[in-house]
Image (tube, helix red, strand yellow):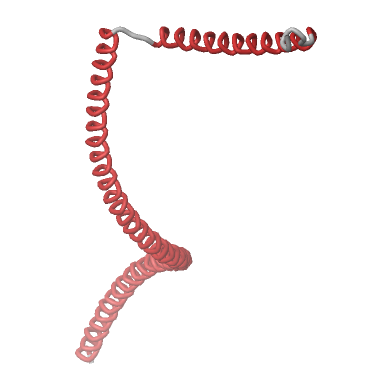
Amino acid sequence: MAEASKNPLEEENIFSFAFQQLRDVIGSQEQVIHRLKSTMAIQEEKFVSKEEYEAVVKKLEEEKAAHAQTKGLLAKETEKLQFALGEVEVLSKQLEREKQAFEKALSSVKNKVLTESTKKDKLITKCNEIESHIIKQEDILNGKENEIKELQNVISHQKQIFRHQISDFRIQKQQENYMAQVLDRKQKKAGGLLSSRGFKGLGDK
């Protein structure tokens, strides 16, 4: 009798609350089911067969082996590179030493060339001075030679005149000697005639 006397509104409210609770539970379950389906779909997408898995594993092993081989080659090439870099460093140092030696030798040669060039310039100047002096001396000598030639011409002319004079003198001398001889013979002849005449006069007496 007590239960029959419950308020219908209260019963409706309780029913509504229970229904709402049930709906919430169902909604939660539906969400869980949806998540499970999504998870199952993802798992199905991710699922592979054993053959595919073994093929992938084999390929992975091959890739690992190839990677290991590449690493080995890389290590060898790195070693070669380090060795080559060492040689390059040695050669670079040697080249630097040779470069310094070359620059030193070049500097020495330049200084020597400069010194020799200075000497050459001095020698050229001195040679020019000597050449100028020689030219002056040659001019003087040429003048002297001309004077000597003129003197030789004068002497030659004087010799010719002297020779003519000597020739004339000899001719004159010969003429004088001849005239003297002629006069001497005439005088002797005249003297002989006078003597003979004198002796003849004395005999006549």
Q: Residue lying furthest front in this view?
A: 1
The quadrant of the rendering that contains the N terminus is: top right
- Residue 99 image position (x, y, % from top left): 34, 54
Of residues 51 and 193, the one drawn nearer to the viewer in this rendering: 51
In the picture provided, is 64 more to the left or to the right than 114? left
Residue 2 seen in this snapshot: yes
**Above or below: residue 165 compared with residue 98:** below
Residue 142 seen in this snapshot: no
**Above or below: residue 54 compared with residue 93:** above
In the picture provided, is 160 more to the left or to the right than 39? left
- The mark total stands at 0
The quadrant of the rendering that contains the C terminus is: bottom left
- In which image quadrant can residue 116 be found? bottom left
- Residue 188 image position (x, y, % from top left): 25, 81
- Residue 7 image position (x, y, % from top left): 79, 10
**Above or below: residue 31 compared with residue 183:** above
Taking the spot 26% from the left edge, 32% from the top edge, the residue there is: 71
- In which image quadrant can residue 52 be found? top left
Of residues 177 and 72, the one drawn nearer to the viewer in this rendering: 72
- Residue 170 image position (x, y, % from top left): 31, 71
Of residues 99 and 86, the one drawn nearer to the viewer in this rendering: 86
Taking the spot 27% from the left edge, 76% from the top edge, the residue there is: 181
Of residues 138 and 113, the one drawn nearer to the viewer in this rendering: 113
**Above or below: residue 103 compared with residue 190:** above
Taking the spot 71% from the left edge, 13% from the top edge, the residue there is: 17
